[in-house]
Image: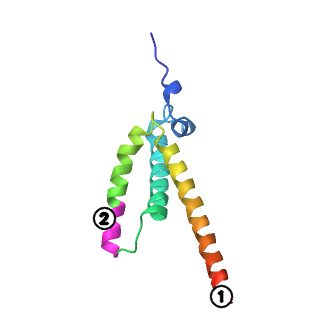
């Protein structure tokens, strides 16, 4: 009995074809996960920090994304980050609109 790995790949792993050229395409998956993690961090959790603390945060984020990349081959890690980023973007847009409406209501 032979198992076809392609059937079990997550969407982004299949999109980047990590089963065909893993040396290169795993890097594409890694950078996608890292970029989405940075977006989610910036939209949901980031605060003004000194430069050295920001470097430490992004270093650990990059190390954590290494583990997430290996999990993201078969699990929907990247897809979850896309959903999280979309939810946070919608939240920030709605928050901005709400503050804008309050400012317009307060001014005579």
Give whichever of discs 1 and 2 has the lower sequence position.
Answer: 2
Q: How is the image coloured?
A: rainbow
Above or below, 105 against 27 in this view is: below
Badge 2 element: helix
Q: Is 20 a magenta residue?
A: no
Q: Which residue is mark 1?
A: 107
Q: Which residue is mark 2?
A: 56
- The quarter holding residue 26 reads top left
Marks 1, 2: nearer the viewer: 1
Measuring 49% from the left and 49% from the top, which residue is drawn there? 81
Q: Marks 1 and 2, Cα distance to the nearest angstrom? A: 43 Å
Whether 19 is drawn above or below 57: the answer is above
Location of residue 54 (image quadrant): bottom left
In this view, the residue farthest toward the bottom is 108
The majority secondary structure of the magenta stretch comes to helix
What span is in magenta?
A: 50-58
Residue 68 in the image: x percent, y percent?
39, 44
Query: In the rendering, at what x and y percent does residue 95 appear?
Result: 57, 68
Residue 45 falls in image quadrant: bottom left
Q: Residue at x 30, y 72 (%)?
A: 52
Q: Residue furthest right?
A: 108
What is the quadrant of the C terminus in the image? bottom right
In the image: residue 13, left or right of residue 53: right
Q: Residue at x 54, y 40 (%)?
A: 12
**Relative to residue 67, is residue 96 depicted above or below?**
below
How many C-alpha atoms fall within 10 Å of the one at disc 2: few (<14), some, or many (≥20)? few
- Answer above or below: position of 52 versus 1: below
The residue closer to the viewer here, 98 or 71, is 98
């Amino acid at each position: 009995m032979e198992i076809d790995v392609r059937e079990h790949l997550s969407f982004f792993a299949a999109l980047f074809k990590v089963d065909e050229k893993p040396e290169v395409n795993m890097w594409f998956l890694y950078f996608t996960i890292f970029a989405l993690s940075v977006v989610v961090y910036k939209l949901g959790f980031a605060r003004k920090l000194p430069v050295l603390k920001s470097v430490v945060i992004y270093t650990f984020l990059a190390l954590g994304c290494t583990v997430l990349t290996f999990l993201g081959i078969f699990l929907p890690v990247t897809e979850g980050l896309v959903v999280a980023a979309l939810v946070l973007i919608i939240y920030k847009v709605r928050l901005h609109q709400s503050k804008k409406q309050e400012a317009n209501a307060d001014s005579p």
